[in-house]
Image (tube, grey):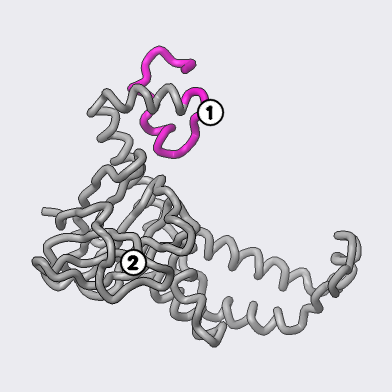
Amino acid sequence: MRTEDPHSLTGAYALHALPDDEREAFERHLAGCATCEQEAREFAAATARLGLAATVVPAPALRDRVLHRVTTVRQVPPGGGTAEKARRVVPRGRGLARWALAACVAAAAGLGGTAVWQYERAQDAGQRAAQAERRAETLAGVLAAPDAESRTARLADGASGTLVVSERQDRAVFLASGMAEPPRGKVYQLWFDDHGTMRSAGLMDPGSTSQAVLMDGAVDGAAGVGITVEPAGGSKQPTSDPIALLSMPA
């Protein structure tokens, strides 16, 4: 570790900005320092909230233009070869289409891939995009709500989870940081604890270790939130012991 004071590295650690040797040394320090552990969790949660709350949703007109322009762009045939051949497929006049596609990709990344992933099974691409956009707007609205309250807990293997609830909107968001991928063929499922009765609140993206998930359904007075490991596609009722339980923020 290049610094003499490991307490100054909590922010860099939460942002995954430490080299491997410094990260390993800091994690050894973290195991015995409750102050740094709490600070690192809070930094990770705050970073996720600020990033999502500051996103800008692309206008619906931009999505419609992109979907229309995509239908006019030829695809490179199988075995098309070099990048030079790929560049020759698209005429110069279609530079705007490429710019618009890049802008939409960047906007989607800023909004988080979770909302899109939760709807990728929908049949119609336009409907899927509209649903994902509305979901992302709701998610960002919960995080930025004036009455938003949060609770952070340490999960297994050094991961952290933050539950954000807006009572006024009656919605909740779960922010995960550094979670291990579930076993093959499994998925993490979120549940509302309705005072002893578990109600499904949606699935997490099995391919993402850090994500923000808009929980399905209203909070509706739930006492807490649980996470279980379920078969791909989820379950109607929990089939495993919870790997984490969080009470609702005070």
Question: Around disc 2, counting alpha carbons within 10 Å, would you say few (fewer than 14), some (14 to 19), or many (20 or more)?
Answer: many
x and y percentages locating residue 157 in the rendered image? 36, 40
Residue range highlighted in magenta: 1-22
x and y percentages locating residue 148 in the rendered image? 21, 58
Q: Taking 94 as reference, is 27 above or below it?
A: above
Which amino acid, mark 1?
Answer: Pro
Residue tagged 1? 19
Cα distance, mark 1 to mark 2? 32 Å
Q: Residue at x 36, y 61 (%)?
A: 188
The reply to whether residue 221 is visible in this rendering is yes
Q: What label sits on residue 41 in the rendered view?
A: none
Assign a secondary structure to mark 1.
loop
Residue 5 falls inside the magenta stretch: yes
x and y percentages locating residue 165 in the rendered image? 21, 61
Between residues 161 and 39, which one lies in front from this camera angle? 161
Q: Residue at x 37, y 24 (%)?
A: 28
Left or right: 94 with respect to 202?
Answer: right
Q: Taking 112 as reference, is 232 above or below it?
A: below
Residue tagged 2? 214
Q: N-terminal of the two: label 1 or label 2?
A: 1
Q: Taking 37 as reference, is 58 above or below it?
A: below
Q: Taking 62 as reference, is 114 above or below it?
A: above
Q: Residue at x 38, y 47 (%)?
A: 177
Left or right: 247 with respect to 213?
Answer: left
Which amino acid, mark 2?
Answer: Leu
Question: Around disc 1, counting alpha carbons within 10 Å, would you say few (fewer than 14), some (14 to 19), or many (20 or more)?
Answer: few
Residue 215 falls inside the magenta stretch: no
x and y percentages locating residue 240 in the rendered image? 27, 61
The picture quadrant where one finds residue 246 is: bottom left
